[in-house]
Image (cartoon, rainbow, N blue to C red):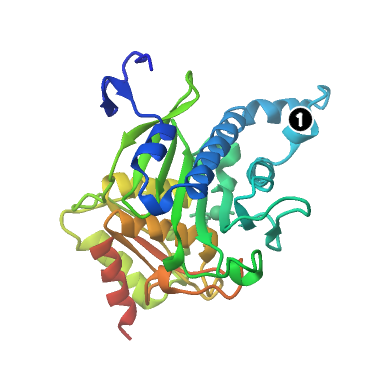
Amino acid sequence: MVQPNGMSNLPMVNGQFITIERFLLDRQPEYAKGDLTTILYDMALAGKIISAQTRRAGLLDVLGLAGQVNVQGESQQKLDLMADDVIIRLNDHTGRLAAMVTEEQKDWVRIPEGYRKGSYVLVYDPLDGSSNIDTNISIGTIFGLYRVVDRTNRGRLEDCLQAGRKLVAAGYIIYGTSTMLVYSAGNGVHSFTLEPSLGEFLLSQEGMLFPEIPSYYSFNHSAGRSWSPQVEKYANWLRDSYQPPMSYRYIGSMVADFHRNLVHGGIFAYPATPEKPNGKIRLLYEAAPLAYLAEQAGGYGSNGRRALLDVVPTDIHERTPVFIGNRDLVAKAEEFLRQS
Ligand code: AHM
Ligand code: MG
């Protein structure tokens, strides 16, 4: 591939950038080859399409508001519904999936009659942080992949209600200053940046790890008045006692807060409050995939008492408190929350 100007910092093999396709073909562990690799490639394609749509979101809004231009129905859909539709349409007919679970649909998504069923279940939040869409702030797609529980009987609720520990791959696509795809299939966390003029995701970093010294902590402090005394003490400890001091950053898109903390080190938390006894974040398609990535990057995700990956969901849209990021910071949160 020709080297675009100013991109010499990306890893190369034999003078060439490494496309996600090449990476998936060459570097996937044996167990992840086949359908799993192809689903990951399909998610990369979904990311390209959603990225293109989010880049045009402001324009589509203007056209929609003017009401005089005959915008296609699809363009006028809310962006999160459009993203949901893109992912379903790219995946429902491929014969690789047995079921899907999405934040945007009340029930789990069945593979339509007439299409072959596969052995995997795709769980996803099509556009996390969607309250940020109209203010041009980073948002993202989060996804996880499970194998069906029983290959002879595919596509049931119990295939969807699996603990994060059973994930075989997870990732996110972040639509920010650039579009990046970050994923793991159990052999470390790898990131790719979309080169817009080529329309290709190129390897940015293989084997991402949380830096040892964290830089940021991310809570919504406006909820502070409702926190338990334990959460309050922990937040105060992060602010007043942690050395070297960390900065406070909260975007309001968990995927973007997580990504920044993965790159620079830190912790994101969305604790329980009396108003939201289980917090806000959804276990199956938000917390578990990010907890899987966190553990693959040397970090940890907890609900404040135990590993998020060990919690078996009883409802596809179940919520959970979340503490996720550098392992020692999350372990410290558990320590504070154990205190009476
Ligand atoms: P969403 O999936 O509807 O976008 O909601 C989840 C988002 C998270 O990305 C983010 O961390 C959180 O909601 C922000 O909520 P709050 O405004 O209560 O802090
Ligand atoms: Mg979300």
x, y percent for residue 127: 58, 46
Of 224 and 54, which appears nearest the observer?
54
Residue 196 can be seen, yes or no: yes
Residue at the extreme bottom of the image, as rendered: 340
Q: Is residue 251 above or below residue 200?
A: below
Of 96 and 236, which appears nearest the observer?
96
Q: Is residue 97 above or below residue 133?
A: below
x, y percent for residue 198: 47, 20
The amino acid pointed to by label 1 is Leu
Q: Is residue 117 above or below residue 183?
A: below
State whether label 1 is within 8 Å of ligand 1: no
Task: Report ligand 2 position as a quadrant.
Answer: bottom right
Of 138 and 145, which appears nearest the observer?
145
x, y percent for residue 108: 68, 62
Residue at the (46%, 57%) spot, across then down: 289
Circle 1 sits on which residue?
A: 65
SS assignment at label 1: helix
Residue at the extreme left of the image, as rendered: 243
x, y percent for residue 169: 44, 54
Q: Quadrant of the C terminus?
A: bottom left
Q: Quadrant of the N terminus?
A: top left
Q: Residues within 10 Å of mark 1 (few under 14, many from 20)?
A: few
Residue at the (23%, 61%) spot, across then down: 240
| Left or right relative to 155: residue 166 | left
Residue 332, image quadrant: bottom left
Of 75 and 87, which appears nearest the observer?
87
Residue 280 can be seen, yes or no: no
